[in-house]
Image (cartoon, rainbow, N blue to C red):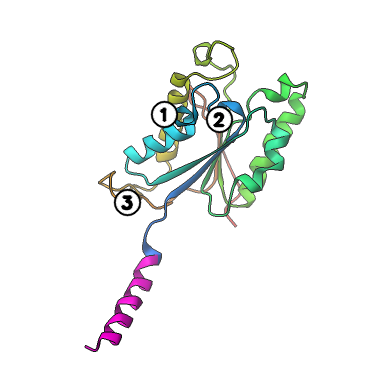
Amino acid sequence: MPLRLCVCVVAALWLLVSPLQARPLSIVAIGASNTSGFGVGEQNAYPAVLERLLRQKGIDAHVTNAGVLGDVTAGMRNRLDAAVPKGTDIVILQPGGNDLRFFGTKEARTANIAAMTQHLHVRGIRVIVYDPNPVPRDFYQWDGIHFNAAAHAKIAATLAVQITATIKPSAIAPDSDAPNAAPANMAPATTDSPNTPPARTTPSPSKP
């Protein structure tokens, strides 16, 4: 077979196979200082711990930390599309307590959470709202505001269980060290509120 023809055949086969290769599960965690990892470092914040846990389970996940120190739900809502790029599979929304700490209202906070959730559902993105009430006392650092490293680990473990429960078994690779271990084979978008203990789940509009 002439060299040029051989190259063309190989290229054609690559084009046929490459669309079938799995892409990583894309997750964005949006919130304020407790999402960013204030006081424990970003590497110990729940988004980074969650990514490690999912990969240990054989799921090729990438978790982006979009926490901003001092942010409120109105700020999260304003930057939502910039923080959540096209191709995102899951958003973990941690509204935090800054709204009420900075003289906002419960009604405005609830409305912003609902608006963000609805907007993401329209985009076909699953939303997990992490908003425990009350927060366990042993979650806090000395300041009574920010989560300690153990709390971040517990949050990540709770989220990992909830996320893996919605991924098709075929998406989990037998070898967790293999590249491109799991495609983003997700159940339909839902709004989950994982607390520690577990929380409610409500259905969302179908993906457009």
Q: Residue at x 36, y 61 (%)?
A: 21
Disc on res. 54: none
Question: Majority secondary structure of the magenta segment?
Answer: helix
Q: Say which amino acid is labelled 2.
A: Thr
Depth check, front residue: 142 or 159: 142
Depth check, front residue: 99 or 39: 39
User: Where, by quadrant of the figure, is residue 78 drawn?
Assistant: top right
User: Where, by quadrant of the figure, is residue 4 drawn?
Assistant: bottom left
Label 3 environment density (alpha carbons within 10 Å; few <14, some 14–19, many ≥20): some
Distance from the alpha carbon under mark 2 to that under mark 3: 27 Å
Q: Quadrant of the N terminus?
A: bottom left
Q: Which residues are magenta?
A: 1-18
Return the disc, 2 or 3, that comes first in the chain's sequence.
2
Disc on res. 35: 2
Distance from the alpha carbon under mark 1 to that under mark 2: 15 Å
Label 2 environment density (alpha carbons within 10 Å; few <14, some 14–19, many ≥20): many
Residue 139 place in picture, x, y as percent: 51, 16
Q: Residue at x 32, y 75 (%)?
A: 13
In the image, residue 147 above or below residue 3: above
In the image, residue 66 above or below residue 206: above
- The local secondary structure at tag 2 comes to helix
Disc on res. 179: 3
In the image, residue 54 above or below residue 32: below
Residue 179 place in picture, x, y as percent: 32, 51
Q: Is residue 5 magenta?
A: yes
Q: Which residue is mark 1?
A: 157
Q: Residue at x 43, y 51 (%)?
A: 184
Return the disc, 1 or 2, that comes first in the chain's sequence.
2
Q: Say which amino acid is labelled 1.
A: Ala
Name the residue furthest bottom: 2
Question: Mark 1, mark 2: which one is toward the viewer?
Answer: 2
- The local secondary structure at tag 1 comes to helix
